């Protein structure tokens, strides 16, 4: 037999719970922080580092015992448990609420504490709006904490918290005075990047007392003391302590589990009067906690393992009846097995008599080791056992029945859990549950429509939460035997989702088909009229249609205040999109604040939408004001996804106004964001990125970004205009005509001029370049007729430019020069400096045509200088070439911009060229010069343009031919580098 198994187990050490060591500094810091209430303590550290132990040791100390504390923990459930940690904290710390003299507000607690029904006030009237319900619930909790005289509320494992719990914590710390000190523990590596927890540190009130504590691994000396405390305080060899510290990184949980495993394996021996590990250099400590836990579990009796697996499947504190039911053991064996499972050190029992794992990683290790068929069976048992609870936990039931493959039960409990989350104001959890349900289960049509109507897409973290829902709704339409009302309901929801996703044309088609069978006086029919008015492909409405639109919502319509406000905002937005000046008066009538939390989200989003319309009209001060209001509301009420939308709209506005410093980096970050920025906003960011790349000659990147932006119908017209402008510069007139025909017709000839300001000059220029001057004139007339004298500075400047282009095409250069000057003034007044400079270039060219070079050439020189300062190098180079053709000798006064080197390479371009000839890639050059690859690409293209070559190889040959770099200075050739031409070059 193996000698290890022959060891007399009586000679093995007795394992004790480790003493609290190595945390004296942290203990003092926690005592100081909580000794100055109210405090906010963020306690962070990796799994098993000892956050829970530190908190419990403090609460058990004389300092901690002087104040009443409630402690709750967030379970690692896939389906979030709304306010679960707070509810559990209150339940575990409070026997009953009798005699607290709670106000009527506390009746809102009844859904969460039905066992206190006899002592709680009557339930208040239901509130349709889940956000308002959540706010009321939060205030009820605050009253309860105050009546209980709670000094410290501690919530553990907040990286698993549902949004409602995090919002409640934010609610607490934002109140003055702060009701209680707050302690949260979490693992930073598992904290989502958009977690509301970040606000506890970044946006606390100025007078808040914040303490952030990060638990570090134990030192080698502390490791020795830690292990010694588990071995009856006997000596531990220095070699063993160092070895254990190295292999566990000083993480207490890993050390404890490893010591217990070594004891089970008889791997501990007495050496020189102390404990050491047998054959230290040859027998390795298990590399992960999982290995340690599973080996410990494997040494237990099968019945005990069954209890441990049941606890792992439940993943939340459970009573012994539920635990035994999931384990499937006979009653006569279950008690002994549960006692052994509790005694093995992996489980713990709380004050309520409920059992759970001491460490979540141990729980996960055991769960993942359970065979999949056995998991399904145990989840089914868990679901059936929990169904019989006095207070059925619907979120847990949804989780278990889902894992068991019981679709009907899963759907039933998931919807109940979503409704409960919504009633508590937890819109994010409700949306997540409903989204998962709709996209996973083949639901009946009525259920599908009902659930999709409930989904609020804004709280969902995915950049594209729409595509899966669209696929499900399209699949529903393919089903046979749908009634006309069912089909209309599905199509309307499909159109709504497509519109929110930015696919307006597809949305219009679906909504048009739905309207035929929607009840005329329904909210859906009213919204359908608004959606159709907003669609890019819609012709200008008749006066009768406009009148009907202005009357939405009808006074007789039976809808909630939230629905009425939503309709008012959508109608106002539609009227602005249609160019109705009266809509601005209606904008002033919209509320800018509300006591209803759900309406606040609508109001904040409305500010962002109005800002976007203000940009289209050219009201840039209004746009910035609205963006500031949207950002303020998003910040105050934790409307996380709105931050991305505001940032993108602001970036677009900065493009127009010439605020380009750092803009490329900002839009790149928005495009790369995985969370917090919707897909449609990422495409607007791509539009700005494409426009910026076009400035610097990065043609390939520009077109890629612009094509991506064009996938969103809201950005398609502007991205098409930018692409067509590039085609015109290349001389590809027919392609520019083809690209601009449809958007030009939709916007200008249909009279929807707010959409046409960017496409109009490009379309007119393309028609003129093709010799279709009459068509260009018809288009300008249609634009002018639709726009009239509307107070829309951007479209009016665009119209002025169109007139000038048309006049120049007729050969009337002098009149065209005057019209271009008017357009320059219009662009400058906005301000839109880039458009003003491009228009001034055309003004100067007209002056050259009429023989006024003394005026035109200085104007061109000044324009080139300003374009260079702005960052529009390609346009500046074009003007410099014109100045050379006219033999300009006056120079160009330099401002803050970089010097112009004409067709000569700049010093930085020479440096890039030297590395290029050596065969360096763009990435290697960027790393060497500490710049971005985008900058390197721009400089290479600039050098290629100046030296009139079409490829990198051609550029390398030209540089060597001109002797711009010396051969001996070339770096050595490496893989994937362009090699110099053979035969040697001087």
Image (cartoon, helix red, strand yellow):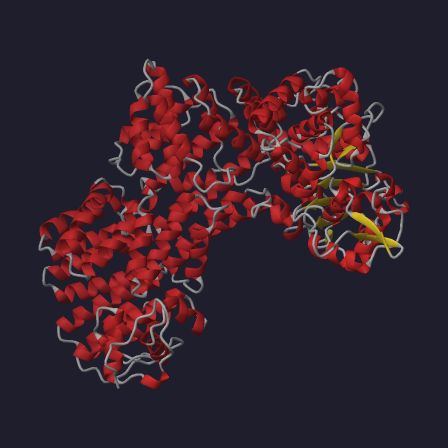
Position of 560 with respect to 224 (left or right) is left
Q: Residue at x 27, y 68 (%)?
A: 875
Q: Judge by depth and name the residue closer to the eye, 887 or 95.
A: 95
Q: Position of residue 357 (x, y in %)?
A: 72, 35
Number of disc labels: 0
Asked if 602 appears above or below 31 in the picture, the reply is above
Q: Position of residue 675 (x, y in %)?
A: 50, 46
Q: Is residue 677 visible?
A: yes
**Can you say which quadrant of the picture contains the N terminus?**
top right
Q: Position of residue 393 (x, y in %)?
A: 65, 23
Position of 101 with respect to 963 (left or right) is right
Asked if 537 appears above or below 665 in the picture, the reply is above
Residue 504 placement: quadrant: top left
Position of 864 with respect to 143 (left or right) is left
Asked if 582 appears above or below 821 in the picture, the reply is above
Toward the front, the furthest residue is 1
Residue 300 placement: quadrant: top right
Q: Residue at x 21, y 55 (%)?
A: 802
Q: Is residue 128 visible?
A: no
**Can you say which quadrant of the picture contains the C terminus?**
bottom left
Q: Position of residue 688 (x, y in %)?
A: 37, 55
Q: Residue at x 78, y 16 (%)?
A: 332
Asked if 227 appears above or below 366 in the picture, the reply is below
Q: Judge by depth and name the residue closer to the eye, 918 or 487.
A: 918
Q: Judge by depth and name the residue closer to the eye, 593 or 874.
A: 874
């Amino acid at each position: 037999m193996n000698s290890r198994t022959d060891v007399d187990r009586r000679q093995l050490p007795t394992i004790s719970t480790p003493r609290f060591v190595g945390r004296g500094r942290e203990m003092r810091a926690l005592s100081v922080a909580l000794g100055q209430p109210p405090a906010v303590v963020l306690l962070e550290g990796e799994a098993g580092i000892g956050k829970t132990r530190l908190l419990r040791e403090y609460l058990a100390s004389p300092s901690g015992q002087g104040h009443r504390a409630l402690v709750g923990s967030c379970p690692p459930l896939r389906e979030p448990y709304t306010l679960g940690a707070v509810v559990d904290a209150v339940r575990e710390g409070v026997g009953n609420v009798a005699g607290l003299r709670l106000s009527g507000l506390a009746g809102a607690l009844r859904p969460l504490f039905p066992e206190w029904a006899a002592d709680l006030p009557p339930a208040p009237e239901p509130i349709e709006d889940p956000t308002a319900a959540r706010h009321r619930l939060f205030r009820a909790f605050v009253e309860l904490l105050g009546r209980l005289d709670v000094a410290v509320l501690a919530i553990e494992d907040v990286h698993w918290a549902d949004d409602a719990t995090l919002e409640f914590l934010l609610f607490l710390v934002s109140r003055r005075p702060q009701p209680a000190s707050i302690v949260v523990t979490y693992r930073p590596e598992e904290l989502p990047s958009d977690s509301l927890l970040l606000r506890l540190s970044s946006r606390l009130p100025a007078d808040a007392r914040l303490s952030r504590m990060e638990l570090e691994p134990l030192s080698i000396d502390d490791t020795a003391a830690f292990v010694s405390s588990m071995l009856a305080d006997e000596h531990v060899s220095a070699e063993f302590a160092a070895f254990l510290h190295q292999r566990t990184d000083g993480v207490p949980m890993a050390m404890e589990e490893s010591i217990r495993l070594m004891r089970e394996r008889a791997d501990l021996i007495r050496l020189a009067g102390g404990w050491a590990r047998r054959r230290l250099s040859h027998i390795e400590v298990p590399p992960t906690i999982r290995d340690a836990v599973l080996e410990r579990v494997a040494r237990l009796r099968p019945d005990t393992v069954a209890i441990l697996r049941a606890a792992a499947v439940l993943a939340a504190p459970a009573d012994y009846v539920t635990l035994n039911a999931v384990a499937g053991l006979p009653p006569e064996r279950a008690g002994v097995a549960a006692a052994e499972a509790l005694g093995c050190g992996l489980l713990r029992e709380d004050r309520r008599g409920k059992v759970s794992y001491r460490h979540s990683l141990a729980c996960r290790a055991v769960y993942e080791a359970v065979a999949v068929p056995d998991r399904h069976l145990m989840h089914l048992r868990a679901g059936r056992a929990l169904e019989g609870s006095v207070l059925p936990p619907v979120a847990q039931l949804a989780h278990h029945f889902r894992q068991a493959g019981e679709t009907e039960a899963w759907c039933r409990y998931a919807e109940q859990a979503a409704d409960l989350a919504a009633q508590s104001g937890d819109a994010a959890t409700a949306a997540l549950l409903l989204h998962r349900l709709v996209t996973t289960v083949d639901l009946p049509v009525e259920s599908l429509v009902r659930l999709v109507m409930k989904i609020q897409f804004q709280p969902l973290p995915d950049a594209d939460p729409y595509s899966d829902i669209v696929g499900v709704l399209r699949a529903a339409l393919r089903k046979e035997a749908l009634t006309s009302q069912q089909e209309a309901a599905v199509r309307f929801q499909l159109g709504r989702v497509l519109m929110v996703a930015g696919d307006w044309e597809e949305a219009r088609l679906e909504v048009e088909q739905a309207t035929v069978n929607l009840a005329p006086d329904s909210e859906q029919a009213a919204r359908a009229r608004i959606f159709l008015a907003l669609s890019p492909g819609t012709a200008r409405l008749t006066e009768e249609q406009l009148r009907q639109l202005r009357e939405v919502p009808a006074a007789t319509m039976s809808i909630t205040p939230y629905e009425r406000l939503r309709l008012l905002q959508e109608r106002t937005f539609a009227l602005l999109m249609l160019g109705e000046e009266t809509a601005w008066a209606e904008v002033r009538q919209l509320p800018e604040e509300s006591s209803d939390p759900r309406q606040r989200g609508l109001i904040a989003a409305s500010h962002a939408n109005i800002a976007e319309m203000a940009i289209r009209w050219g009201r840039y001060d209004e746009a910035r004001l609205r963006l500031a209001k949207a950002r303020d509301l998003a910040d105050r009420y934790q409307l996380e996804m709105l931050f991305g939308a505001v940032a993108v709209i602001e970036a677009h506005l900065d493009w127009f106004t010439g605020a380009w410093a750092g803009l490329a980096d900002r839009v790149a970050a928005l495009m790369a964001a995985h969370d917090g920025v919707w897909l449609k906003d990422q495409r607007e960011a791509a539009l700005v990125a494409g426009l910026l790349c076009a400035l610097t000659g990065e043609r390939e990147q520009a077109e890629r970004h612009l094509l991506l932006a064009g996938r969103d119908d809201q950005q398609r017209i502007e991205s098409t205009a930018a692409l067509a402008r590039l085609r015109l510069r290349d001389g590809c007139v027919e392609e520019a005509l083809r690209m601009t025909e449809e958007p030009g017709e939709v916007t200008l000839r249909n009279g929807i001029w707010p959409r046409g300001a960017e496409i109009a000059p490009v379309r007119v220029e393309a028609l003129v370049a093709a010799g279709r001057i009459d068509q260009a004139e018809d288009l300008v007339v249609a634009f002018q007729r639709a726009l009239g004298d509307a107070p829309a500075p951007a479209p009016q400047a665009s119209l002025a430019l169109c007139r000038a282009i048309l006049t120049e095409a007729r050969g009337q250069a002098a009149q065209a020069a005057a019209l271009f000057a008017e357009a320059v003034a219009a662009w400058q007044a906005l301000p839109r400096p880039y458009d003003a400079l491009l228009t001034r270039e055309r003004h100067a060219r007209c002056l050259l045509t009429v023989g006024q070079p003394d005026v035109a050439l200085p104007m061109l020189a000044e324009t080139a200088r300003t374009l260079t300062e702005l960052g529009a190098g390609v346009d500046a180079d074009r003007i410099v070439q014109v100045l050379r053709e006219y033999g300009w000798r006056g120079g160009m006064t330099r401002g803050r911009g970089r010097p112009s080197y004409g067709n000569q390479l700049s010093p930085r371009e020479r440096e890039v060229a030297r590395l290029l000839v050596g065969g360096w890639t763009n990435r290697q050059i960027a790393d060497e010069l500490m710049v971005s690859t985008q900058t390197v690409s721009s400089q290479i293209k600039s050098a290629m343009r100046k030296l009139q070559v079409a490829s990198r190889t051609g550029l390398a040959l030209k540089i060597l031919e001109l002797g711009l770099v010396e051969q001996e200075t070339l770096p050595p050739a490496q893989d994937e580098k362009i090699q110099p031409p053979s035969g040697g070059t001087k």
